[in-house]
Amino acid sequence: MNLYGHDMDETVSPLEAGMGWTIARKPEDRRFNGRAALDAQQAAGVPMKQVGLVLEGRGVLRDGQKVLVDGIGEGVITSGSFSPTLKHSIAIARVPAATGDSAMVDLRGTLTPVRVVQMPFVRHGKKVFN
């Protein structure tokens, strides 16, 4: 679940925060505040997306850490911690839309590889990613 003030706020659209599914856009003629802006952003292409990150080495992913995607750009971790269930440090991050399945995180000045995964991390008590 997104945490207001970390994973989303008034400067991040629902499309960038992975919350597009919460917008009731049907019927097509349904009007609401912000509809035009959301439609325009979707038509132009959403520049950022929300993903999960898994750190398989040592360390803890924390909000505010920079995420670097080679040849594409950079993003930021919005929430992160160690997961006792997964036995890995995990995070939610906002990254460029073209991000693939790997990235680097700046952990105290050291670029550290992370795996980019779809969320949720756990469903029905089992991890979703391999």
Image: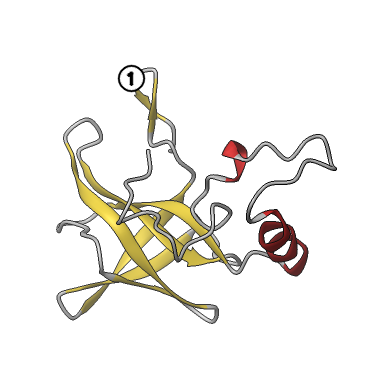
Q: Position of residue 17 (x, y in %)?
A: 49, 53
Q: Which element is circle 1 on?
A: loop
Query: Where 112 falls versus 121 (above or below)?
Result: below
Question: Where's residue 40, x and y in %?
Answer: 74, 65
Is 55 on the left-hand or right-hand side of 18?
left
**Residue visible at 53% across and 45% down in the picture:** 19
The residue wearing badge 1 is 125
Residue 1 is drawn in which quadrant?
top left
- Residue at the image position 16 percent from the left and 34 percent from the top: 84
Residue that appears at 35% across and 60% down: 114
* Foreground of the two, 16 or 112: 16
Quadrant for residue 107, please give it: bottom left
Would you say 69 lies left or right of 22 here?
Answer: left
- Which quadrant would the C terminus be assigned to in this image? top left
31 on left or right of 124: right
Give the vertical position of 52 relative to 121 (above or below): below
Q: Residues within 10 Å of mark 1 (few under 14, many from 20)?
A: few
Q: Amino acid at mark 1?
A: Gly
